[in-house]
Image: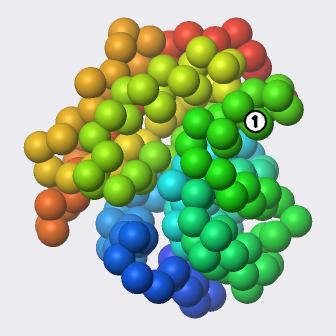
Amino acid sequence: MRIIAGSARGRTLRAPRGTDTRPTQDYVRESLFNILIRDVPDARVLDLFAGSGALALEALSRGAAEAVLADSSAEAAACARQNAEAARVAERATIIRADWRDALNRLAGERRAFDLVFLDPPYRMTDTAAICAGMAERGLLAGGALIVIEHGAGAEPALDDRFALRDARRYGGGTEIHFYTYRGGIQEHA
């Protein structure tokens, strides 16, 4: 696994051991970021279920302003921190070891808002709608924020009408990615 493009291009990333983390494959990540080419520069990024941090670190490498990487696993959080240092983007990366609810509560307390959100939970976790609603209710989404949800085939998110489907892609290995634009919010990108 490596950073595909940008300032950290070619840097090798390590993944946490075990089967709890399923890193996004390089070819899927490359395709994803080709789709997001206009959304990444200067974005404030949130990567929930960050695992190795590959998605947020790729965004930072490609010009995102800052990123918060959250994961409940101590090993994943340590791995993401090491990867951020190896990619030389650690000064723009905040690593949080917390489950998604605690991470959202902490970020709401800090009055943070994000332009680009990556949700790549374990495929057995199918209720991403609750996470998206939680982000909206806590004021964590800037107006027009883009939410990218990676999930298993056939488990399309059922988000409420605050979120508009922008695109959907299917990849090999049973991976699907849905892109939603947040229609609410009054916060402006700083």
Q: Please state which of residues 89 and 34 is positioned toward the viewer in this rendering.
A: 89
Horizontal relation, residue 13 to residue 139: left or right: left
Q: Is residue 113 visible?
A: no
Q: Is residue 76 above or below residue 1?
A: above
Q: Indicate the quadrant containing the C terminus: top left, top right, bottom left or bottom right.
A: top right
Which residue sits at x=47%, y=31%? 131
Q: Is residue 68 above or below residue 81?
A: above
Q: Please state which of residues 30 and 44 is positioned toward the viewer in this rendering.
A: 44
Badge 1: few (under 14), some or many (20 or more) residues near its Cα, within 10 Å?
Answer: some
Q: How many marks?
A: 1
Which residue sits at x=63%, y=25%? 141
Which residue sits at x=11%, y=43%? 154
Q: Is residue 91 visible?
A: yes
Which residue sits at x=74%, y=60%? 95
Q: Which residue is mark 1?
A: 107
Horizontal relation, residue 121 to residue 173: left or right: right
Residue at the outermost left position:
154
Q: Amino acid at mark 1?
A: Leu
Horizontal relation, residue 107 to residue 102: left or right: right
Residue 25 placement (x, y as % from top left): 35, 74
Residue 75 placement (x, y as % from top left): 60, 76
Q: How is the image coloured?
A: rainbow
Q: Secondary structure at mark 1?
A: helix
Q: Quadrant of residue 6?
A: bottom right
Q: Is residue 32 above or below residue 111?
A: below
Residue 13 placement (x, y as % from top left): 57, 84
Q: Please state which of residues 26 and 50 is positioned toward the viewer in this rendering.
A: 50
Q: Is residue 26 above or below residue 10?
A: above
